[in-house]
Image (cartoon, helix red, strand yellow):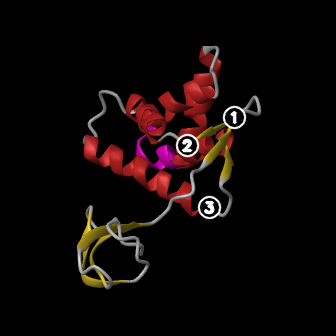
């Protein structure tokens, strides 16, 4: 690590400890040449997820967009907000654990629907109605019938 004071490339680590709730490491260093001390932080570099939209555009993954879609589908349900946010976080973790860094938006929608189906039936129907663009009551009825058949 290069000393910010004298530019010397050799320094020694005096102290290391976890910072930012374990997301980084804070290191206290001392320059071997000038004996001045400085602090560095070491963090994991996250490669961003790229979402391939239906029209072919590529956009960076937005956690807030995922959370807001799930929160809207769970609106006025008797589900604690922390549980909903944890649900969204588990989906985000699954996305980051996929081998590909580019994921079609359709795959994310299907993943959310699959998880919501077991999480809360009403939230699932709400999400499905927007995601699948239900245009009439028959679409709703068919989806509810499929949900009932799966519960048996």
Label 1 or label 2, whichever comes before in sequence order: 1
Magenta stretch: includes residue 116: yes
Quadrant (top left, top right, bottom left, bottom right) of the N terminus: bottom left
Magenta stretch: includes residue 107: no
Front-most of residues 14 and 87: 14
Q: Position of residue 37 (x, y in %)?
A: 23, 74
- Tell me whether the residue at label 1 lies in contact with that at label 2, contact meaning CB atoms closer than 8 angstroms: no
Q: Is residue 49 above or below residue 69?
A: below
Distance CA(mark 3)–CA(mark 2) = 13 Å
Distance CA(mark 1)–CA(mark 3) = 17 Å
Label 1 or label 3, whichever comes before in sequence order: 1
Which residues are the magenta region? 115-122
Residue 100 location, quadrant: bottom right
Front-most of residues 9 and 128: 9
Residue 60 location, quadrant: top right
* Disc sitting over residue 98 in the figure: 3
Q: Look at the numbered disc 2 and give the secondary structure of its residue.
A: loop
Q: Look at the numbered disc 1 and give the secondary structure of its residue.
A: loop
Q: Position of residue 96 (x, y in %)?
A: 55, 58
Front-most of residues 141 and 81: 81
- Tell me whether the residue at label 1 lies in contact with that at label 3, contact meaning CB atoms closer than 8 angstroms: no
Of tags 3 and 2, the one toward the viewer is: 2
From the image, tell me which residue sits under label 2: 61
Label 3 or label 2, whichever comes before in sequence order: 2
Q: Position of residue 73 (x, y in %)?
A: 43, 31
Q: Position of residue 136 (x, y in %)?
A: 63, 14
From the image, tell me which residue sits under label 1: 53
Q: Is residue 75 above or below residue 121?
A: above
């Amino acid at each position: 690590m290069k000393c910010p004071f004298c530019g010397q490339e050799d320094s020694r680590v005096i102290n290391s400890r976890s910072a930012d709730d374990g997301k980084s490491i804070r290191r206290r260093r001392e320059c071997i040449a000038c004996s001045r001390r400085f602090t560095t932080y070491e963090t994991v570099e996250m490669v961003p997820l790229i979402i391939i939209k239906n029209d072919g555009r590529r956009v960076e993954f937005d956690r807030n967009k995922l959370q807001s879609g799930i929160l809207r589908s769970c609106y006025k349900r008797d589900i604690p907000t922390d549980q909903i946010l944890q649900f969204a976080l588990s989906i985000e973790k699954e996305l980051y654990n996929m081998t590909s860094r580019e994921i079609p938006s359709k795959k994310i929608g299907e993943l959310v629907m699959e998880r919501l189906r077991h999480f809360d039936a009403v939230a699932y129907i709400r999400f499905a109605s927007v995601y699948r663009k239900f245009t009439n009551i028959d679409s709703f009825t068919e989806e509810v019938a499929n949900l009932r058949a799966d519960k048996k």
